Image (cartoon, rainbow, N blue to C red):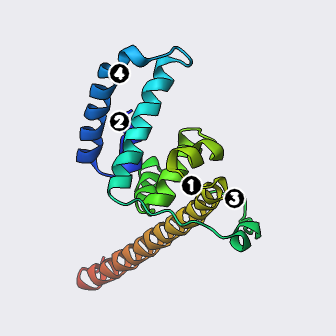
């Protein structure tokens, strides 16, 4: 549950506070549990709803779409996905705007469908789909930038290492 809070809020302190408040809510509302789903699903729903309410208070911005944008299909990018560490993916996920990150997390990580997300966030289903699509595109962009930055850093480190080796060889011939 903590990971859900952290992914949605991207702040350790807020995630801890919200999780604690969620468990207080769970224990105070335990008598309202209707056994229509598992206890775990019910708890998860409370945590997700509390995260969304917290973000709404902080003005979660989700762009509503007009029909013209909704009808245009997004071009598909290549299917090749290089391997990245969990840390680099989480870092990239935290760089997404709140609206993108929340929809992406709810859909891909938590397994909600777009209809459920639309109801939770009080937006249209098309908006949920477009936010998810835009989040994927932005996430790819962030990861590519991270990858190109790390490649250029490793190249510059290699160059500086070879330069320092050349300098050492000049000072201390073998």
**Residue 34 drawn above or below residue 137:** above
Q: Which image quadrant is residue 94 in?
A: bottom left
- Which residue is the site of mark 3? 80
State how far apart marks 1 and 2 are (Cα). 26 Å
On residue 29, which mark appears? Answer: 4
Upstream in the sequence, badge 3 or badge 2? 2
Q: Position of residue 127 (x, y in %)?
A: 61, 59
Which element type, helix, strand or loop, lies under badge 3?
loop
Q: CA distance from mark 2 to mark 4?
A: 20 Å
Q: Which residue is more in the foreground, 143 or 24?
A: 24
Question: Does residue 8 appear in this view?
Answer: yes
Compare marks 2 and 4 and give the one earlier in the sequence.
2
Horizontally, residue 121 falls left or right of residue 91, namely right
- Return the residue at label 2: 2
Q: Are marks 3 and 1 in contact (CB under 8 Å)?
A: no
- Mark 3 vs mark 1: give the one in front: 1
Q: Give the quadrant of the N terminus.
A: top left
The answer to the question of whether label 2 and label 4 lie on touching residues, with beta carbons closer than 8 A, is no
- Helix or strand or loop: what does disc 1 sit on? loop
Q: Position of 163 compared to 103: left or right?
A: left
Quarter of the rendering containing residue 91? bottom left
Q: Residues within 10 Å of mark 1 (few under 14, many from 20)?
A: some
Indicate the position of residue 83 as horizontal and vertical percent values. 57, 53
Mark 2 vs mark 4, foreground winner is 4
Of mark 3 and mark 1, the one earlier in the sequence is: 3
Sequence order check, earlier mark of 1 and 2: 2
Q: Earlier in the sequence, mark 3 or mark 4?
A: 4
Residue receiving disc 1: 123
Q: Residue at x 51, y 50 (%)?
A: 121
Q: Is residue 15 left or right of residue 39?
A: left
């Amino acid at each position: 549950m903590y990971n859900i809070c952290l992914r949605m809020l991207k702040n350790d302190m807020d995630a801890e506070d919200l999780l604690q408040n969620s468990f207080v809510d769970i224990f105070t509302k335990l008598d309202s549990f209707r056994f229509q789903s598992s206890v775990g699903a019910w708890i998860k729903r409370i945590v997700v709803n509390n995260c969304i309410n917290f973000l709404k208070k902080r003005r979660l911005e989700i762009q509503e779409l007009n029909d013209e944008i909704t009808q245009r299909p997004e071009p598909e990018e290549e299917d090749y996905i290089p391997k990245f560490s969990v840390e680099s993916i989480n870092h990239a996920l935290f760089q997404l705007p709140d609206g993108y990150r929340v929809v992406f997390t709810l859909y891909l990580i938590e397994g909600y469908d777009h209809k459920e997300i639309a109801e939770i966030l009080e937006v249209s289903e098309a908006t949920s789909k477009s936010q998810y699509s835009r989040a994927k595109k932005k996430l790819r962009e962030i990861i590519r930038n991270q990858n190109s930055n790390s490649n250029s850093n490793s190249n510059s480190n290699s160059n500086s290492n070879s330069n320092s080796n050349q300098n050492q060889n000049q000072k201390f011939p073998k």
